[in-house]
Amino acid sequence: MTNKKNNADSAAKKTKKQSGAADGYGKTDKKSASKIDDATLRIALGYEKPPKAGPEAKSKKPADSAVKPKPGGKKQNSGKAGPVKQREADEGSPEKAGATAGIITAICAGVMMCVVLLGGWLFVGRLDTVYPNISMDGIDIGGLSAIDATMVLENSGFRARGDLAVTVELPTNKTLSISAREAGVAVTATQAALAAYRFGRDGNVLSNTLKYLECAFRGAELTVESEFTIDEKYVRGKTNDIVNEINLDIMGSEITVLETYISVIKGTKSLKINAAEIYEMIAGAFKAGRYETMEYLPASSGDEDEIDIVDLYNSVFRKPVNAEYVKETDSVTMSFTGISFSIPQAQTVWDAAKNGEEIHIPLIITEPEISTEYLDGILFRDLLGGTTTALTTGYYRNVNVTLAAESVNGCILLPGEEFSYNETVGRRTREKGYQLAGAYLNGKEVLEIGGGICQVSSTMYNSALLSNLRIIDRTCHYFGVAYLSRGLDATVSWPSPDFKFKNDRDFPIKINAYTDLNAYTVTVEIYGTDTDGSYVVMETVPLSTASTYGATSYRCVYAGDGTLLRRTREDVSYYHYHVEDDDEDDADGEEGTGGAAEETPQSDGNPALPEENFENDPAVPGALFEPPEDGGEPGE
C-alpha cells in the first residue's frame, strides 16, 4: 500500500507541475511552458474550470497500471485500458498537433482583436479632437478641437463659397447661374470644422476605430460639400422660371411675344425642356463642389407636333403684382404687370391656321393697382399734420424731452397698426439717461425721473388729430399746460395712463420728432400720403365748474376746396386749479391721478392758463446741454 500511494502521489505531482502555468496550481518552467496542450489552454482562457484536488485524484493510478491481464495469461480489453491507449496515440499524432496549434493561433488572434477593439473604443470614443491627418479644403486641422479648427480655418483664408456659382448654359442662349449663397450652401468656417470633427464618428465601435486608424496612417482630405443643405424651393423656382422662358422661345421655334400679342408660326418642330433634369444637374454640382459652367442639351422629338396651347399659356401667364412697402427694410418691392390670354380663343385661331401660317394670339395685359414707381413717389410724401410747442429753459427737463423725442422719431405705422407712447419710449430710467425734473403727483409739485416728457406726447396728440388719425387712448393733464390750448394735451405715466392712436389711413405713416434747443421748441410731424386733399381744424369750446375748468374739443374735417365735411366731438377735458399759485402751471412731467383742487374758478368762469414757473428746474440759457456749475441734481 505504501508503494502504491507513493506512486500515485508522484504522478499527481508530475501532472500538477506540468499544468501549473495555465491553471495557477504551481509554477511552470520554461521548457514545460512551450508544451501547453489544448485542455490546459482552454482552462487558461477561462473556457473550462481546473480539476478539483480530492481523494479520487490522489488515489488515481498511473495509466500503465490501469490494464491487468486476467488469469490464464490471456489479455482482455475490459475496462478503460483500450480507449485510454487509443486517445494517447491520437493526441501524439502530427495531425492532432497541427490542429491544436491552429486553434491556439485563432484564439490568440481573437483575443488580440478584442484587445484592439477595446483599446480603440476606450481611446477613440473619448477623443475630443478632429481625427489626425484630416484636412478641410486643403487646410490641415487634424488633432485640433472644433474651436481651434475653426480659428485655423478662418486664419488660413477659408472661404464660405458665397460668391462661387454653378452655371448652366441652356437653349435659346439662356444662362442660369446660382451662387452658393443663393442656394443656401455657403458653409461657414465653424460648420466646416464641425463637419471635420464628426468625420468617422457616425458608425459603430469597429468602423469608428478603423476610420481613426485609416486617418492616422493615410489621412483624409475633406471638403465642405458634405454639410450643405440646398435651398430646394429657391433653386427649383429659379429653374422653373427660366424653363418657362425657354419653352416659350422654342415652342414651335417661331414664337414671339410682343406687347399686345403672341406671334406663332404653325407646324415647326419643338423641344421640351425638363426642369427636373436641370435641377438635378445643379444640385449634383453643388454636392460635388463643382462650381463650373455646364451645358444642358435637351432631346428633340423629331416630329411635327401640334403646339400645346395650355403649355403656351402657362409659359406666358403672370398675375399682376402690386408693389408693397416693407417696414423691416424700409423699401418698396417690385411690381409686375399681369399677362394672359384666352385659351379657347387661342385654340380656335390655332386650329384654323395652316402649317407655316403665322397667327396672332391677343394678350390680355393687366397693370398692377400700385406700381413700384407710384408707391416710391407717394410714400411719406405729404405732411399730414405737425405741431411745434415751446420748451422751458430747464436743462434737465429739456434733456428728458429730447430723449423722448428721439425714441419716437422715425417710427413707421402700416395701415391698421397702433402706436403706443409707453411701449415706444419705454420706462423712463436713469440708465437710459433720463433726469429728475419737475412733475406733479397727487396735486403736488415733485421731482420725477423723466419729468417733462408729457410735452412730447401732448405735441404728438395734437399732430395725430391734425392728421385725421383715430385716437385710441388719451388722458388730459391734472393741471392745464401752457404750451397747448386746453383740450389738446395728453399726459402719460408708467405704466399708465398711456397715449395711443391708430393708422386708419390707406398708406403707411412716419413720425418725425425733434427738439431745437436754440429756439427752445419741440416738434412732432406725421408724414404719409394725402389721397384726397382733406385737412383737419381743431376747435375747442371752454367750460368750467365750481372746482375745475377745461374744454370740449371738436375735429372739423374739410375737403380740399374748403367745404366742411364733418364736425365731431373729440373729447372733454377737465383741469384743476393750481393750489399754490394761480400763475403757476404744472410741470407736465409724468404725473399721477392728483387730488381735488382747493381753489374756486375765477368769476368769469374761464381762467387764463398760468405761466410755467419751475423754481426747482435749473435753467442754463444758451447752453442747455451743459450741466449746472455745481453739478447737482435739481432741487439740491
Image (cartoon, rainbow, N blue to C red):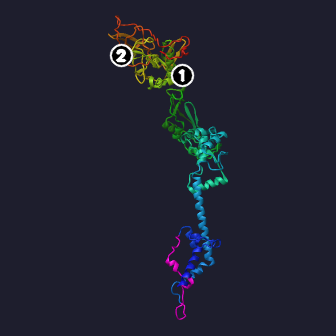
Looking at the image, residue 164 sits to the left or right of residue 605; the answer is right
Residue underneath mark 1: 377
Q: Does the magenta stretch include residue 74?
A: yes
Q: Quick check: 307 above or below 492?
A: below
Crowdedness of circle 1 by 10 Å Cα count: few (<14), some, many (20+)?
Answer: few
Percent across and percent down for residue 234 are: 55, 39
Extreme-left residue of the structure: 546
Whether residue 130 is visible? yes
Q: Mark 2 points at which residue?
A: 595
Between residue 2 and residue 261, name the one nearer to us. Answer: 2
Q: Position of residue 404 (x, y in %)?
A: 49, 20
Q: CB of mark 1 within 8 Å of CB of mark 2?
A: no
Residue at 64%, 54% (x, y): give it.
214
The kind of residue on which mark 1 rests is Gly
Q: Residue 162 carries which label?
A: none
- Determine if residue 187 is in view: no
Query: Does the segment drawn in magenta span residue 243?
Result: no
Please provide the residue range marked out in magenta. 48-75
Location of residue 63 (image quadrant): bottom right
